[in-house]
Amino acid sequence: MLEIKNLHVKLEDEDKQILNGVDLTVEAGKVHAIMGPNGSGKSTLSYVLSGRDGYEVTEGSAELEGEDILEMEPEERAAAGMFLAFQYPVEIPGVGNMTFLRTAVNAQRKARGEEELSASDFLKIIRAKAKTLKIDADMLKRPVNVGFSGGEKKRNEILQMAMLEPKLCILDETDSGLDVDAMKLVAEGVNALRDEGRGFLVITHYQRLLDHIKPDVVHILANGRIVKTGGPELALEVENNGYAGILAEEA
Amino acid sequence: MALPEVKQSATEARLSALSLPESGCLKSAREAALSRVQTMGLPSRRDEYWKYTKPDTLVQASAPKAAVFDADEAPMFSAFERLNIVFVDGVFDAEASDDLSLEGVTIDRIEDICCKDIHWAKDLYGVLEARGQTPVERPLAALNTAFASDGVAIRVTGKVSKPINFTYVHSDENSDAILHHVIRVETGAEVTILENGPAASRFNKCMEIDVADGGKLHLVRAQGRDHERRAATHLFARLGNESVFKSFTLTVNGVLTRNEAVIELTGDDAVAHIAGACVGDGDFHHDDTVFITHDAVNCESRQVFKKVLRNGATGVFQGKILVKEGAQKTDGYQISQSLLLDEDSQFLAKPELEIYADDVACSHGSTSGAIDEEGLFYLRSRGVPHAEATDLMTLAFLAEAVDEIEDADIAADIVSRLEGWLARRR
Ligand SMILES: Nc1ncnc2c1ncn2[C@@H]1O[C@H](COP(=O)(O)OP(=O)(O)OP(=O)(O)O)[C@@H](O)[C@H]1O
Ligand SMILES: [Mg+2]
């Protein structure tokens, strides 16, 4: 599904290298988790994959279902099935959440040559999905993320993911800022989307989320490189012992 | 005191191209206005109040030529149930207009004020304009009072069932129109007035609005889409106890537009909202100049102005809130913002507060900025194409001003014009 090879990334405006040769393959139907110390490059990786400005790929490649995504515009990547649940969802005053989502859903459908969803079909679907995530009608009407609590923003990200039904879902610390119940809701939302044809890349600092969303593979990213890959037990090791041991081992 | 020579000669040149209309009972009002013009002189670039906007083409003896614009869309507000009043190049067109009788309102042409002996109109014509000349001079408004060749007097006595709509048609590329409307909203009466269309190659329009206690007037106007026209408009409003005046102006294109609004809150608990959204591309200069005077207790005023500028367009905002002694519990708000879609465009703002009462809440803010890149990326990452995402963000920027329109259908019509403008520039 997603194949990243030897990815080197630096900041466009600064002489600062952030990713130093990331190799990572996420197969369809699998959940990969990425853990790693603050500043190790996890969000950078997710931004580079979704096409944010400000980064320069100096070496390596990234393909989604065999297609080179690095040359695509962000909206083309989205239409190709890429989705990033932001670590810090952006507030957009003046744009209604519902309008935003309908525009996005239909833009992607159009880009893929599919028929647009009618207003009433869209409404039906979004209401049902919002309900399972305990997002009320008022939140749907409000401007995108404006005045949402931290947890509400994260649930809103999952709602978008559920509506857009992407092929590859990247979740960047979606668990941070969530209370215990909200974490369960979000995990259920993610699990409901788990599917043969869909891959997940879950970035997190905590084992707790991985109790709910069981990963198939866990990677440790440090200094812009994947330094260790293992099964779910690797997350437990991090939870219990931190990164010191793992990093020393790799050095 | 003698005027500076340049101003004197420019004023004389303009006045020599005009003659006072025959106007019976309005004669003294017109002559007084003419003498105000002669004393003040017409605006020049040296004037502080015209620092950001060159008045030359508004003042020169004849109107600069402006091509008639052929819009490829239905005129605004045409889908609404309304009473339509049409002016072509500043001349009332009875054929094209609806029958002017409507319950709760009387409408007459200003030329009939005297023969029909319409007292309230005689007592209002030129009066609010004259009051509005202090503390800042507005010579183009005095010129208007003196020389206006047409216009209507509207007296609202009840809750009017449908909007009164002015359609201004531009048909002659040399037309130079001066229109003056007087409007009185009586106690407890209510009306919505709509205005749209380019009017003339050069348009000088003045509206004097007197809202009695508990009266309500909603004014929504749309200027545009023609590119070459020039317009100087003045809105003078005086508000009684518990009255409400809300105005929204959409300006689309136009080489030069100066909209002045002079509002006086003279009755307690009155509310005045003045809002505007403009979109300009290239040879576009738009100036909103607002002066709100709080002269009563517990009044609210809101100014919300948003400008979208691209390709070297210029936006100007001069807005003042004056709170007089004794105008306690004043709630004054003012925001002026521009969205610059490129680095060639500019926004010049001069927000001012002058307060002589101690128990007031006034705030003002002015910003100028580009599209929020974070927001843009967020939208694109969800699959919204760049152009569409930019338009969404642009409409979102204008939303605070458009939200000032109370009627949802009218607001929707305004939004669709904005969408059209943006779509044509993709
Ligand atoms: N636009 C930028 N300008 C300057 N430095 C940047 C920028 N983007 C990323 N960095 C730097 O790159 C490094 C990696 O940042 P990134 O946000 O990818 O870390 P992270 O692994 O997601 O950390 P966290 O766990 O705290 O979220 C950090 O040192 C960060 O300061
Ligand atoms: Mg991060």
Image (tube, rainbow, N blue to C red):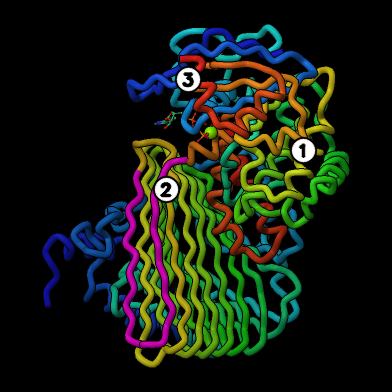
Mark 3: give few (<14), some (14-19) or many (20+) Cα within 10 Å. few
What residue is shown at x 54% (from left), y 87% (from top)? B269
With B301 as the anchor, is B160 left or right in this view? right
Q: Given this view, does label 1 or label 3 mark the residue nearer the observer?
A: 3
Coordinates of residue A127 in the picture (x, y in percent): 84, 47
Question: Which residue is under mark 1?
Answer: A187
Q: Which residues are magenta?
A: B346-371
Q: Is residue A19 above or below residue B386?
A: above
How many numbered marks, from 0 up? 3
Distance in Å between CA atoms under marks 2 and 1: 69 Å
Query: Is residue A216 visible from the viewing direction of this image?
Result: yes
Q: Which residue is label 3 attached to?
A: A248
Q: Which residue type carries mark 2?
A: Asn
Give the vertical position of A61 relative to B105 (above or below): above
- Magenta region's main secondary structure? strand
First-in-chain label (1 vs 3): 1
Frontmost residue, A12 versus B260: A12
- Helix, strand or loop at label 3? It is helix
Q: Is residue B356 magenta?
A: yes
> What is the C-alpha distance between the residues marked 3 and 2?
83 Å
